[in-house]
Amino acid sequence: MTQSHDVEALLDSMANDLTQSLQANQIHDPLMIGIHTGGVWVAQALLKRLQNDIPLGTLNISFYRDDFTRIGMHPQVEPSQLDFNIEDRHIILVDDVLHTGRTIRAALNEIFDYGRPASVKLVVLVQRSGQELPICADVRGMHMDLGADEHVKLTGPDPLALQLQTHEEKTGT
């Protein structure tokens, strides 16, 4: 299944929407955290567009997931890198695809293990149908209504591209 999406245009729009959201909420000194791997790629692309010196941290939420027994554990788990104090700071949490909400729930659990932020704004490249938890992005590039057997994946990091797959394409059957 091939469908083209202009990821660069989505990122431009997201950077603009994020800037407006930060200004509207009078947030002047946020921290950005990307969820490993796709969320980090999106965060890096956004930071280039924002032309700002917002510090970037990375989260690997593998040990915080509640469904790793179903989806499996990645064999090369890398540690999270948050080289800043998040206590009472405004956080911009970035991921590539928001689907069920379980990744974001796990990321929030890990963030709160580091401290209590003043606020968390969620930014995603794609918010797709199928939420299982009441989580919604504050800034999103696009929304996709996909069937249960369809998936979207971000490839990259250079260039960033969205790849749509059916269950059969994903598993090779």
Image: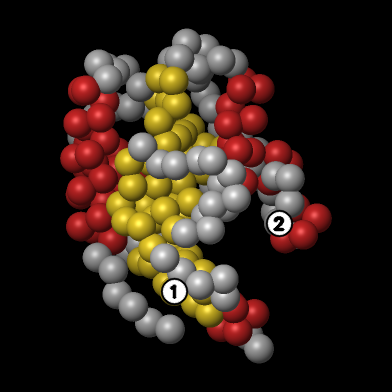
Q: Residue at x 53, y 79 (%)?
A: 166
Q: Indicate the secondary structure of the residue bearing disc 1.
A: strand
Q: Are marks 2 and 1 in contact (CB under 8 Å)?
A: no
Residue 159 lies left or right of residue 171; in this view the side is left
Give percent across and percent down for residue 106. Answer: 64, 38
* Residue positioned 35% across, 22% down in the render: 30
| Nearer to the camera, 131 or 141 | 131
Q: Looking at numbered disc 1 in the image, what kind of residue is underneath it?
A: Leu
What is the residue that sits farthest to the right in this orientation?
Answer: 69
How is the model colour-coded? secondary structure
Residue 6 in view (yes/no): yes
Q: Quadrant of the N terminus?
A: bottom left
For badge 2, the amino acid type reads: His
Residue 6, above or below 115:
below
Quadrant showing the C terminus = bottom right
The percent position of residue 48, horizontal first and vertical second, equals 25, 42
Farthest residue to the top: give it. 88
Q: Is residue 144 left or right of residue 152?
A: left
Label 1, on which residue? 164
Quadrant in which residue 32 is drawn: top left
Structural crowding at the residue carrying mark 2, measured as other residues with C-alpha within 10 Å and reported as few (<14), some (14–19) or many (≥20): few
Q: Which type of secondary structure does the marked residue at label 2 adopt?
A: loop
Residue hosting label 2: 74
Which x, y percent locates residue 137? 40, 41
| Upstream in sequence: badge 2 or badge 1 | 2
Depicted 70 relative to depicted 66: above or below? below
The percent coordinates of residue 162 (x first, y second) are 38, 67
Give the distance between the C-alpha atoms of the residues marked 2 and 1, in whole angstroms. Answer: 22 Å
Label 1 environment density (alpha carbons within 10 Å; few <14, some 14–19, many ≥20) = some
> How many marks can you see?
2
The residue that appears at 26% across and 35% down in the rendered structure is: 18
